[in-house]
Image (tube, coloured by chain):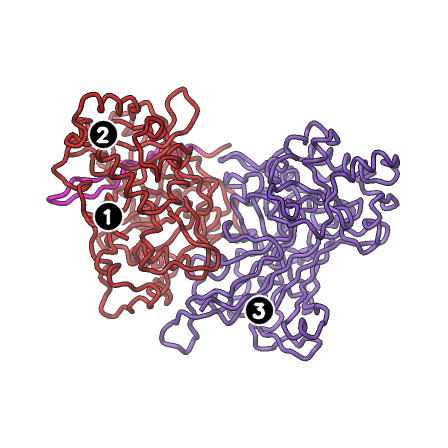
Chain colours: A purple, B red
Amino acid sequence: MTAPLNATHDPQRRSWVESANHPSNDFPLQNLPLGIFRRSGRDAPHIGVAIGDQVVDLAALAAAGFLPDSAKAACAEPTLNSLMGLGPVAWSGLRTRLSELLGADTCAAASRQTAVSACFVPMESATMMLPARVGDYTDFYASVFHATQVGKMFRPENPLLPNYKWVPIGYHGRSSSLVVSGTPIRRPHGQTKTAEAAAPTFTVSQNLDYEVELASYVGPGNAQGAAIPIGEAEGHIFGVSLLNDWSARDLQAWEYQPLGPFLAKNFATSLSPWVVSLEALAPFRVPAFARDPGDPSPLPYLSHARDQMIGGFDLTLEAWIITPKMRAAGEMAARLSRGNFSSMYWTLAQLLTHHASNGCNLLPGDLIGSGTVSGPEKTSRGCLLELTMRGAEPFALPNGEPRGFLQDGDEIILRGYAERPGARRIGLGECRGVVLAANP
Amino acid sequence: MTAPLNATHDPQRRSWVESANHPSNDFPLQNLPLGIFRRSGRDAPHIGVAIGDQVVDLAALAAAGFLPDSAKAACAEPTLNSLMGLGPVAWSGLRTRLSELLGADTCAAASRQTAVSACFVPMESATMMLPARVGDYTDFYASVFHATQVGKMFRPENPLLPNYKWVPIGYHGRSSSLVVSGTPIRRPHGQTKTAEAAAPTFTVSQNLDYEVELASYVGPGNAQGAAIPIGEAEGHIFGVSLLNDWSARDLQAWEYQPLGPFLAKNFATSLSPWVVSLEALAPFRVPAFARDPGDPSPLPYLSHARDQMIGGFDLTLEAWIITPKMRAAGEMAARLSRGNFSSMYWTLAQLLTHHASNGCNLLPGDLIGSGTVSGPEKTSRGCLLELTMRGAEPFALPNGEPRGFLQDGDEIILRGYAERPGARRIGLGECRGVVLAANP
């Protein structure tokens, strides 16, 4: 379902929205990510597309007759769920139309630009919301580097379990506590127990962590009892965002056996507001992860020649931090890690196909997290647990501050982008969250 | 928040709906469970209350001016979510009014009975639906007998993990695949691997199982970041139903480490249609499970004198089966097990309070499964995994058929009820599901 490159990808094309043409802008004409916003002081959530420093109100564009019939009604909804349910032909048609409306070459007439810009809201005055009503949120564990590093800490004798290279390991997360970028995160309480202690205590988590993940949103999905063949999987992926899977490592270590993480994760999960389509990322497709010679091939239901050839995404994902001390000193954020989604052991298509392989019904707007994106290099480790060896080797920030785990007031900023010579840079935007002190 | 006994519990009271007065009927005047139904051939889902063999349409009762102002608008909704959000004062007010309207003593005038019975739909012609839009479904593991039995099979050296008696172990389930009683269950495919095999295969599950559980529905719930004190927990429980947590044991054994069950469970979970309030169950409250002298006391956040005194429910839960052969011979269902909810290690209040203790927000309509209800006796084991020692000791049905795990065409029927001398029997109704052959 990966669309071939077309005029919407042409790196030479510019928007008449000048801010979109700056080379470092996340939202050029070639991106066109969708999200949900409210105008400041107004209540109704609308679908918007990001272009440079502007949000274009799709409900207003639809009302003005600018949108294709196939997507018009869905674009007037208060969430992206209906549009997600329409599938890739409608998504692509909408993208083409938006590209025409915002392209300097295809929308040159001043009168038409005036009509379109009547639907603009400056990004700085738009309040972003979650892009979809997420019915179910699933989190995978698709980085073999993350699984191995974490496995070493929790099970030194047995870091990578025997199923890992066969089964895309995943579990269900909590939908109710998904929050949009910018929402503060309350430090949780919970049960913890050190190896030496005779009994656990219920206390404030001391080992609060973030996890850099890529999230994908489900498109049309499948009926209960039906499966989604691997060759069709990408037609069921509406797009991707950044996800921060906040994790209380002290709670996790004590609670997670035998049924997996629960309260260590479900207090909050942050999402970036803009959803970037797979079509926008088409110029950045790369082969699926190159398995080691000794690794098994994927079982047939997870195996597809095209997925192997272009199942990956050359997408850089970064974590940054601003501590209260840095904020007080007016310092910029410091980078904690930089990884790449191409290092993931399983492709997005494999995660989705595996999820539906037992007949589990995936619905429009369902959210699938990739799991922490960590690569082979130490600098690419996507959480403090790995970066600091469970806090034992604190990370040294540029101002000399050490960080084993997160402190109150720390802000974590995830950033994601794709860039390569000959293509226009595509950004995912940011996913931010500041840690609040625990309730008394 | 457990209401004292009042006129709605009086076992001497009868309904003018004669079918409700039969001693074995699940839905006497003292029960008044709520659910969502459609009239045959009509589309709009309405809230109904079960009385004997009738369903009373609450939207119609509300329109006719029979319901209290506090619950009137919520009773006209197509799901129970709004009513669940109102809290125990409104729930109790509605129950009192329904008891008055349906009581032979309190609604003796023929004209009034005629007006109320204009809102009746015969149960046999009502199509039942899920009671609520379930935002998040959580499944616990609250039977120490189940945890120990299953632990023995999966981890013979380490059956009950060290956290079990401190932490109410739970994990997130799948909301999208919740189905109402009567929905057929498609046998899933998935990865399985025997200990001897070098590699897993993707195949039809051979070890399909059921699990007898009690489900509770969340009432008002809590804001993200806030907790629910144990003393207030029951005010956030709208009521209980039967839940069948269908489980593919061969898939589960291979996939569940380290993040817990996933595809082994999320293909389908069945719910009974009627939600029985905690107030209806007030005559059947018993002390919380008596821990062994060597067991730890619950940590303070899970400890409350009243919960210890009456945290339990004397509620019998049974699993029954009809095989294709039995069906063809016109035989009745055979009982597989009979357990009691009073044998659960953790109370419903403890499960809810633990769930919110990290600030995880619980919302009206969220579903909390208890985990398999198994007691100390072999006859009380609530799944085939336990009853048959992982299929090694098949269960002998009355007609001589053996059952290790479920076969295609088998129907599982869960039943639940509370009864004791001096109280009117309260039934939960049934939760049924027949196993369909896997897709080719």
- Please state the chain letter of the residue tagged with numbered disc 2 in the rendered image: B
**Disc nearer the start of the sequence (1/2):** 2
Q: CA distance from mark 3 to mark 2?
A: 58 Å
Count neighbours of disc 3 (C-alpha within 10 A) and say few if under 14, some if 14 to 19, many if 20 or more: many
Which contiguous range is marked in magenta?
Answer: B409-437
- In the rendering, at what x and y percent does residue B81 appear? 41, 41
Q: Is residue B384 visible?
A: no
B413 to B330, vertically: above or below: below
Q: Amino acid at mark 3?
A: Leu
The circle drawn on residue B52 is: 2
Q: Quadrant of residue B287?
A: bottom left
Q: Amino acid at mark 2?
A: Gly
Q: Secondary structure at mark 2?
A: loop
Q: Which residue is mark 1?
A: B339
Q: Which residue is mark 3?
A: A385
- In the rendering, at what x and y percent does residue A272 appear? 64, 53
Which is nearer the eye, A72 or A350?
A72
Q: Are marks 3 and 1 in contact (CB under 8 Å)?
A: no
- In the rendering, at what x and y percent does residue B416 appear? 25, 41
Q: CA distance from mark 3 to mark 1?
A: 43 Å
**For the point 56% across and 70% down, which residue is it?**
A408
- In the rendering, at what x and y percent does residue B130 appear? 40, 36
Do the residues indicated by labels 3 and 2 lie within the same chain of the protein?
Answer: no
Q: Main secondary structure of the magenta part?
A: strand
